[in-house]
Amino acid sequence: MLSNEAWGLLVRDGGLRRGGAAGDRQGEIMLEFEGRAALVTGGGSGIGRETCLALAARGAFVWVTDYDRASAEATVDLIGRAGGRARALRLDVALEAEWEAALALTDDHADGLRILVNCAGKSIIAETFAMPVEDLRRILSINVEGTFLGMKHGIPRIARSGGGAVVNMSSALAMKGVARMAAYCGSKAAIEMMTKAVALECAELRNGVRVNSVHPGIVDTPAWHKHGPDEVGALSDTLSEGASVLSADEVARKVVPIGVACSAGEIAQTICFLASDAARHITGAGIVIDGGMTAG
Ligand SMILES: NC(=O)c1ccc[n+]([C@@H]2O[C@H](COP(=O)([O-])OP(=O)(O)OC[C@H]3O[C@@H](n4cnc5c(N)ncnc54)[C@H](O)[C@@H]3O)[C@@H](O)[C@H]2O)c1
C-alpha cells in the first residue's frame, strides 16, 4: 500500500484515482495492474513520464525507456520515491537491436510483459519544399519504424505472458493536416492505420493482445519548448501570431475549440484505461483527446 506522501507524489493532474471504475468499492485503491509489467517508450518526459507514473501507481512494474537514459532514470526515481516499481533502460526506438536487447531483459521478469506503450515521438515544423528528405526519414524512423518495431518484438512477448494491450501514440494531426507539418502528420496517420492492421492480425491469431491508438490535440509538455527558432518562425504565423516561442497554452487558445491545452496526466489516464481490462472489448480503435479540434 502506498503512503499518503507517495500518493501525493504520484497524483498529478488528477492522475491517480481511488475507486471509480465500475465495480470498485468506493475509496478502494485501484491497483488493476498489480502483477503486470509494462514497457513505455519516451518515458523520460512529458506524456511518457506521466504514463509511467500512472501505470506504476496502479501497481504495474514499469520498464521506463528513453534514448535519453538520464531522463528515464529520473522517472524511475519519482516512481521509486512513491513506492512504485520500475527500472530505467536506454532504448532508441529507431534501432531494432536496441528493441531486441531491451525486450530480452523483460523475458526474465516475474510479471512478464503485459502492456506496451509506444509513446516516443518527434515532430518537425518545416516548409515541405525546402525540407531535406533526411529530415523526413528521421521523423519516420522514430514515429513509424519505432512503433512498428515495438509491436513486432513486443506483441509476441505480451501474448506469451498471457495477453494484454498495446497503446500507440498517434495524434489529432493524423486526421487533420497542418501546413508545414507534412512529415509529422504523415507519420501519425501511418501509426493510426498500422494500429488497426495489427489489431486485426492479433484478433485473427486470438493471441489476447489488443492494439489501440490515442490521438491527442495540444498537450502541455516540454516538447513545445524543443522547437528551434526556424521551426517556431514557420508555424508561428499560422498558430501563434509571430510569437518567439511556441507555448501549448497560446496555441490551444487558437486551435482547440474548448480553448485550453490538455495535460500530460489526462492523456496518461486514457492510456491506462486502454491498457486495462475495462477496455477488454476495445481493439483497433483510435481514441481522440483533442478538446474538439477534429470535431468540425
Ligand atoms: N505534446 C503534444 O501536444 C502532443 C500532441 C499529440 C501527440 N503527441 C505525441 O506524444 C508523444 C510524446 O510527446 P511529448 O509531448 O510528451 O514530448 P516530450 O518531448 O516531452 O517527450 C518525448 C520523449 O521521447 C523521447 N524520444 C525522442 N526520440 C526518441 C527515440 N528515438 N527513442 C526513444 N525515445 C525518444 C525523448 O527523449 C522524450 O523523453 C509523441 O509521440 C508526440 O508526437 C504530443
Image (cartoon, grey):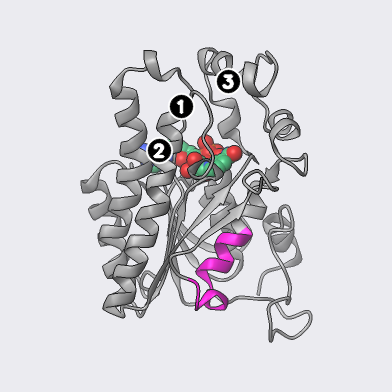
Q: Is residue 51 visible?
A: yes
| In-front residue for pair 227/103 | 227
If you read the primary sequence from the N terminus, does the residue marked by circle 3 or circle 1 appear first?
1
Numbered circle sitting on residue 186: 2
Q: Residue furthest left?
A: 97
Task: Please state which amino acid type lies under the numbered disc 3.
Answer: Leu
| Location of the N terminus (image quadrant) | bottom right
* Magenta region, residue range: 269-282
State whether residue 240 is above or below residue 114: above
Disc 3 and disc 1: Cα gap in Å?
A: 10 Å
Q: Residue at x 71, y 63 (%)?
A: 7
Left or right of residue 99: residue 69: right
Numbered circle sitting on residue 235: 3
- The residue that disc 1 covers is 124
Q: Residue at x 31, y 80 (%)?
A: 206
Instruction: Measuring from the top left, give residue 226's x and y in whole percent.
Output: 54, 26
Instruction: Measuring from the top left, give residue 117's x and y in whole percent.
Output: 45, 57
Disc 3 and disc 2: Cα gap in Å?
A: 17 Å
Callout 3 secondary element: helix
Is residue 148 on the magenta stretch?
A: no
